[in-house]
């Protein structure tokens, strides 16, 4: 397996196999973002119910994936990571019953994701797959709790048409002081001079969407007052 496209195709194949087995799941993380704004990712994060876990692991093992006990996720809570091809790895992270954020202790249950999700087509360079993903607003909230550079980029990409009142509802959980610190770090990240090149490279855009940056800055200032 070589290159981003091959790895993306492998992940799409896994998602298609999950669907073919009639399994219910919600795709979060980078591929959730890709349902709205395409970007490459070499791992897929999936929220599922614990009673279905065995079926998911069977599909992955049939495709040559092995359990990865060394993977350090941004999430806490119960999860399993599966890896294929160590030279150019593809990983599938199974988040069982909930997504729990390590940075703020916020969590969203599978049922919560299911109730705030939509069926969307994720289009890749060669393949596509229709899956259930969180609403833009819920994705934004989860990523604001996480607070890494990749999350800041994703939020800027998603925020243009988002209903910010809904984001505020989804974000209201976890440790509030730790969330404040994460949001302040995001505000600093998007103000850094390196952020523009980072964003344009990941989302293949020629310019930085200034209005979206300003919208995010305004939201952070509002919720941290």
Image (cartoon, helix red, strand yellow):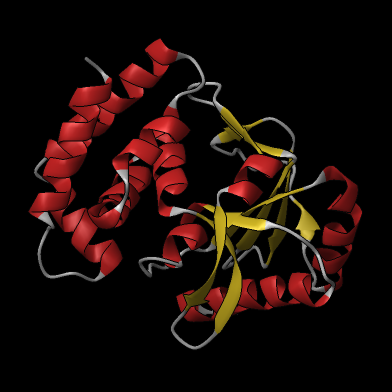
Residue 145 visible at all: no
Q: Is residue 172 left or right of residue 159?
A: right
Q: Nearer the viewer, residue 177 or 7?
A: 177
Q: Nearer the viewer, residue 209 or 136?
A: 136
Q: Going 34% across and 52% down the picture, which residue do you hit? A: 154
Q: Is residue 208 left or right of residue 77?
A: left
Q: Going 59% across and 59% down the picture, which residue do you hit? A: 44
Q: Residue furthest top?
A: 177
Quadrant hosting residue 203: bottom left
Quadrant hosting residue 219: top left
Q: How many marks?
A: 0
Q: Is residue 62 left or right of residue 214?
A: right
Q: Nearer the viewer, residue 30 or 85?
A: 30
Q: Nearer the viewer, residue 147 or 156?
A: 156
Image spot of residue 210 (x, y percent): 8, 52
Up-down: is 163 above or below 76?
below
Quadrant hosting residue 180: top left
Image spot of residue 55 (x, y percent): 89, 60
Image spot of residue 143 (x, y percent): 42, 41
Q: Going 44% across and 84% down the picture, which residue do you hit? A: 125
Q: Residue furthest bottom?
A: 126
Up-down: is 28 above or below 138?
below
Q: Quadrant of the N terminus?
A: bottom right
Q: Is residue 65 left or right of residue 107?
A: right
Residue 186 visible at all: yes
Image spot of residue 40 (x, y percent): 42, 68
Q: Quadrant of the C terminus?
A: top left
């Amino acid at each position: 397996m070589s290159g981003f496209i091959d790895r993306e195709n492998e992940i799409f194949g896994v998602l298609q196999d999950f669907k073919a087995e009639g399994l219910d799941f919600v795709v979060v993380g980078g591929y959730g973002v890709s349902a709205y704004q395409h970007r490459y990712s070499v791992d897929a994060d999936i929220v599922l119910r614990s009673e279905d876990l065995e079926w998911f692991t069977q599909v992955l093992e049939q495709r040559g994936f092995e359990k990865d006990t060394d993977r350090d996720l941004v999430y806490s809570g119960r999860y399993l990571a599966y890896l294929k091809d160590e030279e150019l790895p593809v990983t599938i992270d199974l988040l069982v019953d909930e997504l729990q954020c390590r940075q703020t202790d916020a969590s969203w249950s599978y049922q919560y994701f299911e109730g705030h999700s939509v069926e969307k087509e994720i289009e890749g360079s060669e393949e596509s797959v229709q899956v259930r993903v969180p609403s833009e607003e819920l994705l934004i909230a989860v990523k604001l709790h996480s607070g890494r550079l990749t999350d800041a980029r994703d939020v800027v990409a998603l925020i243009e048409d988002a209903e910010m009142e809904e984001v505020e509802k989804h974000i209201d959980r976890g440790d509030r002081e730790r969330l404040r610190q994460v949001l302040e770090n995001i505000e600093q990240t998007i103000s850094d001079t390196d952020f523009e090149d980072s964003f344009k490279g990941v989302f293949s855009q020629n310019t930085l969407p200034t209005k979206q940056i300003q919208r995010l800055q305004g939201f952070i200032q509002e919720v941290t007052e």
